[in-house]
Structure formats: C-alpha cells, structure tokens
Image (cartoon, rainbow, N blue to C red):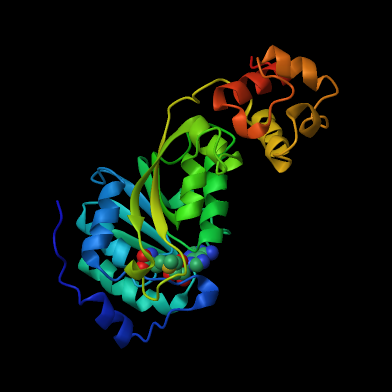
Amino acid sequence: MSQIDTLPPLREVIATHQLSARKSLGQNFLLDLNLTAKIARQAGDLTGCDVLEIGPGPGGLTRGLLAEGARRVLAVEKDSRCLPVLEKIADAYPDRLQVINGDALEIDPLQYLTPPVRVVANLPYNVGTELLVRWLTPKDWPPFWQSLTLMFQREVAERIVAQPGSKAYGRLAILAQWRAKAQIVLSLPPGAFTPPPKVSSAVVHLEALPEPRYPADAATLSRVVAAAFNQRRKMLRASLKGVSPDIEAHLEAAGIPPTERAEQVSLEAFCALARSLKPVA
Ligand code: SAM
C-alpha cells in the first residue's frame, strides 16, 4: 500500500519552518520516512480505519499513516508551530487529515472519530503512560479503540508486556494484559530520533480483546492491584490488609497463599481475588 508522497524531506521541512525541538514538549522527532511507514504498518491494516494520532509534530508518522492507507487521521498536537507543516500534509491528502491544536490530556477526540479506530503515537513518555492508563480503564469494554500502537521508553514497554516473576511485572502489565493483547513490535536505538533521547525506545502494540481474559469487576481489580504492588516486597496478607478485614480468607478462596508477594501472582489469580472480594453478576 505504501506510496511515497510528494512532500519535501522532513529535514528540509524542519529547517524551513524553524522547528527546533523543544525539550519541554518531549520533542524527539522521527525523520526517516521509511521508519515511520514501518511503525505505521505495525498498527495493522489501516484501510477503512480512522487513526487517532497524538503528537504528530512535523508529521513524519502522520505521513506514514496516510501513505499506508488510513481512511482518516485525526492528529492532536500541542505545539502550534507545527500547524503550518501539518496543513501542507492535509493539502497533499485531501479530506483525510484533521488537526486539532491542543493538549491530548484535555481534549476528548471521540466526537471526531468514526469506528473502527486505531490509535498511533510517538509521545513524550509521561503523557504516553498517562494516556495509556486512561485508554485501558474506560467504564465500558470494548473501548473506542481497536488497537493502540505506542512508542515508549524501552523500560516502560517492558513493564507493559511483563510476566509474573519479573521485576517489571506490576499494575501496568495487569491493566494492559487483562483486556488486551500486548506485544513489543519494534525496538529503536536513541539514534533513530532527532535529537536522540538518553535511552532506547520500543513500540508496543495492543489489540483490544472483545471480552476481558478473566471476569472481574474493573474497579475492584484495579484497587487490589494498586495496593498489592504499592508494597510489592510485602506479603499479600499485609499489603492488602486495607482492602478487606478478611483478606486472608479471600486470598485462600482465590487459591493464593497469603504469604505470596504480588510479583508472583498471575493475572488469572488477581482476577479470582477480585471476584472473591466482589462477585461478578
Ligand atoms: N510524532 C512526531 C514524530 O514521531 O516525529 C513527534 C514526536 S515527539 C516525541 C512528541 C510530540 O508530541 C511533539 O510534537 C510534541 O509537541 C507533542 N506533544 C507533547 N505533549 C503533548 C500533549 N500533551 N498533547 C499533544 N501533543 C503533545
């Protein structure tokens, strides 16, 4: 599907528009259009999908998404310096790119999107993690998105896909894996970005499952997991004391030894514990 657009190379675009990267906005740009097309392909088949892109910057990934056939791209960018550049991309792909100038943490883009929706972003890491948690914890499931394809610091990516028994395993792994299939699909060295960040990065792809892997009440599961990993070195009978006065009985009902530590407990067992605390109707 890939087609090379007729727009100028990104280095030229950045020089012409004097888009010097701002640290305060976490700007580490991807200027290699082969690489941005490759990231766009990791999002799956884009034809027939609306894509929500957060933080398009000078538009390298945006161009990849459009060239890979996205039906429409809705791009939310905080830095107004990028708007003229993004407008040129919109002109090259008539009626397929809509840009909103604003903070992704404050804007509700849903009104502009038609399902199926895929989300793709290369964002500052703190914003990315906050949005990921929001996207993973809506009141109703399935969520508005079919997939999320997001760039993270390698260490954060590893926390999302971590399995029990590893240091990286925690709340993020459980939230991500309970109702989605999460994989690291691409690793990138600092030198892939301009300017290069201090650490390596990775792209995580999450596909929403139609149903949670195991039944549980979302709020109860979230509360239990937060308490368990807040004091991850403690035995669960101690770390979860505040969750219920009968926590030992609930742990046993879920088949979890009360002396176990959070790091050793599978997603399935956490869901069983959440069900014991609050049976799912
Ligand atoms: N997607 C571009 C690329 O891959 O080259 C830019 C990536 S750069 C890491 C992050 C982008 O997110 C910047 O363009 C920055 O201005 C934008 N950004 C930062 N915080 C944001 C926020 N809260 N809402 C929307 N955009 C934001």
Residue at 27 percent of width and 79 percent of height: 11
The one of 221 and 134 positioned closer to us in this rendering = 221
Residue 128, relative to residue 231: is it above or below? below
Q: Name which residue lies at 29% across and 71% down.
A: 31
Can residue 173 be seen?
Answer: yes
> For residue 226, what is the image quadrant?
top right
Which quarter shows the C terminus? Answer: top right
Snapshot quadrant of residue 67: bottom left
| Whether residue 13 is situated above or below residue 251 in the rendered picture | below
Which residue does the image show at 60% across and 40% down from the upper left? 170
In the image, 57 versus 182, the foreground residue is: 182
At which x and y percent is residue 7? Answer: 19, 73
Q: Is residue 7 toward the left or the right of residue 243 in the image?
A: left
Q: How many marks?
A: 0
Q: Residue at x 21, y 76 (%)?
A: 9
Tell which quarter ligand 1 is in.
Answer: bottom left
Q: Is residue 193 above or below residue 247?
A: below
Q: Give percent across and percent down for residue 64.
A: 25, 60
As drawn, which residue projects farthest toward the right?
Answer: 245
**Quadrant position of residue 167:** top right
The answer to whether any part of residue 53 appears in the image is no
Residue 272 spot, x, y in % from top left: 63, 19
Question: How far from the left and from the top, in percent, is residue 208?
Answer: 42, 35
